[in-house]
Image: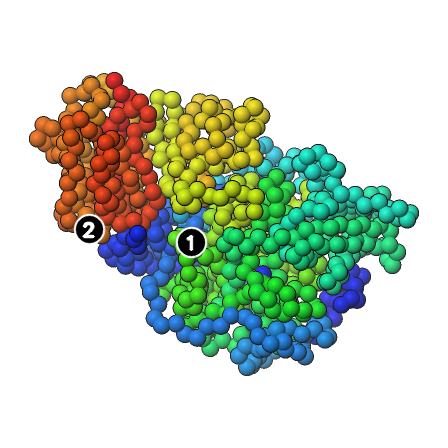
Amino acid sequence: MDHFRKLKAKFEGLTTHDSSSQKAATHPPVQQQGGYSPYGAQQPGMHPPAQSGAQQQGIYPPAKPGDAQQDAYSTPWQMPTHNDTPYPSSGIPSDGIGPGGFFAPPPPPPPPQQQHYGGHGNQFPGNTFPGATFPGGAYPPQSYPPYPPPPGEGPPQTFVGSGGPPPYPPVAPSQEPPSKPPVAVSGSALPAMATAAAVAATATAAVGNPSGPSSAPPAAQDGLRGQDSAPPVQQGQPANYSSNIGALASSQLPPGVPLPLDQHDIMTTTESGEKKHVTRPGDGRNQMLFLNISNNETVHQRFLIVYGQVPGIKGDKDRIVVRHPYFPPLTFPAIDGYFKILVELESGDNGLKFEYLQGDAVVGQGELTIKMEPYTDKPPLILAVVIGSDSKGVFDSPPDARGPGINDLDAAVRKFRCCAYLWQAFIAEQMHRQGFGRRTIRLEEEYEPDTMARDNERRMTAKVHILKSRRTVAEIQDKERAQQWTPPPGYKRHTEESQFSLANEALDDYGVFKGSHHVACLSLDSHWDPEQQLILGHAALGGGSGDRRLGVFGSHSTHAWPANAEEVAAKFLDTTQTDTRYLANDCGGCGEYWRAANVGMGAFLHECGHLLTLAHTPSGIMSRGFDDYNRTFMISAPGFDGPVRQRDEAGAHWHRTDVIRLRHHPCLRLPSDPPLRDNEKNESGFDVLPTERGLLVQNDSGITMIEVWVDGKYRNHREYTAENLERRRNGSLPAGPDEMATAFPREIVVDVNSWSGWAGGWSKSDKVQLVLTSRATATDNVDNVNDLLHKGSRHDHEGNVVFSSNQLGKGEMKGTEKFEAWFSGKDMRSSTPRLVSIEIRAGDMLDGFILHMDDGSERKVGKCKGGNRSVLSIDPDDDLDHIVVNSGWWIDGLEFVTRQGHTSGWKGGRGGGRHIVKPPLGYCWMGITGSGADWLDSLTMHYAKRK
């Protein structure tokens, strides 16, 4: 137990002694494809990611010199086999998926036995803290591997090659945002660490000017290979990252992160202008200021980060202690009067007493009462540990930290639970700073012995499910399923499965979660193989679609995580060197234990961001900001001189675009939020229609954000929330009439000239993209604004300017053919034929339709070779009004509706997102074009101004 004795000695000055209608269209089988996707090949009957099928998003974009932060959207969205992981491509399309969506495997065989964590208390002789008991016995009877060879024996400790640690994902990143609405994001693993110069350059470029370009183009996906920017890391000589994580100047704060007032710290007033809570002891001790919380404030989470100051104090070895009537005291470091501390709360009023200590002297005191009201009327984040069918239930640890209760399944459960509560506290703090209240995730909880405090009392605490996979450990640790493995040239793969697909399979077998669910899965059987220099059984992936959203991560850094609240400070200060004979130095970013804790818990949070529909951003957690994860919790950080105030937290934040998506996510609702309308609960697609005034953007759920990207770089965004409606109306924020109408406009006209000036300007040769987000968290994009406005319009033979809508469906199926059908609305003065009937050919899929004209001609859209035939007649005094379309990768199904309300009825499948295809007000139908192979795979509306 030498390791823990060292930890205890290191943290001795900080500890006290007191003792979380219809199934989607069944499409004909899609040919399975090879590819560098970790998530399994496309299966019969399932949509690609843009539709009902499921996909993952992998992890963080790579850091590279001068470009350390990556952009917002990973690319692949089309075939589930495509992502940016190390697998070689074989005929895989080049664009990709955006946030959300993962590949769902076929129905599983009967489930094997499953378990969730729980059980009786068990005294573990190997516990770090004598007398501590933890629930749940050893799983199954433990047999621990022999200790690794002593120093000087065994495999070499340095990385192979001269370029430093191998980059996480070995594929070149795409330089463009997605060509289609991101429904899924594919992933991989950690990029190499950036140099100090890269971080500094990135911080300035990305955040120095909110209207300027971001530091990087949109990320292709998690796990793309980046250039090695970190110097070679030798065992025992950690890379010099101290300057990497130095403080950012005020001008370098991330976009959307407001500059606080009090010495660049948290604002000292409430929203109503009142001072934050100040305690004046009246006994000669210094007053204590609480900078991010008010007395009697109500919160909805179990753990809270409290940030404060005792003015006029100097000292770099100080401590802050919080005492709660029902929990053991917690002690965190304090510097120069500043402190951050994690506070545990129970339901109801929590009377907290704080002491600021210099040595044994109490130099400042304060009291707070916090009301905690659990809010359970929202979906929880479910925690699950996946283990192999023959697993020994252990995770990688150094030789002096192995045994029951230390690196077994019970320890993994405790550490994962603590990790999730830290996520909860982090999200609440970040959302609070951004002005949206302490919104955060809810964890599924049950009443059992609570491992978040060493007293082990029974409380409501996070439940952790144990999912026993049908796969053996050998199958899980197959190198072909390792996300960071790159096959040699000519290698023939035996499987296209990933850890993501194995976790998905285990969830299906478990069979407990019905309806919509959000799951974070820890793969217990991850293992560092020093001979192959590879983390086996690991993937960093997140995303989802339909009822399941999933994030997965390996256990290879779990040894560095805290198991309870009392260990948090010690773990974030632990500078023990990572011995690569036994432990992974993931991407060269985990050379010390505190770094491994940051990357393990922070990158796992990144993957949970993906399952919450977030994509890669120019800065923050959804970039590479998790390297600084500890700084939100700690006033002290290894390698940093002085107190870590808010301005010094660097990457430990959500980018503002993440914040807006989280603001409206159902998992982060507050009790004060109004109930969602039906159209706000269900995803509806965006319709983008060029007009003479600009681009008309429509979404039935309401629009919450429009981002502007120029030549692959984030420029700026406009957000639409209940909180900023008044500012839009009074001119404090740029807004057109449509943007002032309501909190969540359902249609907005983008005046391109006006928006160009607001977003820093662009030329006709620039590729301008709009990324669109709805209140239902659906995301889509306009791939090229200039092309849609200028190349998407034409003059017909009568001089009418005919506009084209955004295309629904990709139109890229094998054997697809293009079709055109031109007609005019009956309100249009035109010699073009009028519609008299629409013949539809469809079964489970939409084969196409035939438009019959008043001159006796007919026009096909699609091959129309199969399916059942049905006809919608259009009376002389009636006309086509709109088409309801479900689409994603292709056109799933549709319904034609006339002005008088006659309908064709729904034809085809119901997968994909919902669109209402209708000319803008004052415009008339002029035609439909599309394409199709075995079924219809694209559709575009054409329209002109009514004459």
Q: Position of residue 944 (x, y in %)?
A: 27, 24
Quadrant where the C terminus is found in the figure: top left
Q: Please tell me which residue is depicted at 60% across the width and 76% down the height of the picture.
A: 120
Could you say which is closer to the camera, residue 709 or residue 748? 748
**Distance Cα–Cα, label 2 vs label 1:** 27 Å
Residue 403 is drawn in which quadrant? bottom right
Q: Residue at x 46, y 77 (%)?
A: 390
Which of the 4 image quarters holds residue 569? Answer: bottom right
Q: Is residue 871 above or below residue 534?
A: above
The quarter of the picture where the N terminus appears is: bottom right
- Residue 584 seen in this snapshot: no
Residue 578: where, in percent of width, then height? 63, 64
Give SS at disc 2: loop
Extreme residue toward the left, this view: 856
* Residue 543: x %, y % from top left: 45, 53
Circle 1: residue type: Gly
Rendered image: mark on residue 785: none
Q: Amino acid at mark 2?
A: Gly
Tag 1 secondary structure: strand
- Circle 2 packing at 10 Å, graded few (<14), some (14-19), many (20+), is some
Q: Which mark is residue 544?
A: 1
Marks 1 and 2: in contact by CB < 8 Å?
no
Q: Residue at x 67, y 36 (%)?
A: 271
Residue 872 seen anywhere in this rendered image of the structure: yes
Identify the residue at horizontal 46%, vertical 24% (top origin): 737
Q: How many marks?
A: 2
Residue wearing tag 2: 843
Between 667 and 598, the one nearer to me in the picture: 667
Closer to the chain start, of discs 2 and 1, is: 1
Of discs 2 and 1, which sits in the foreground? 2
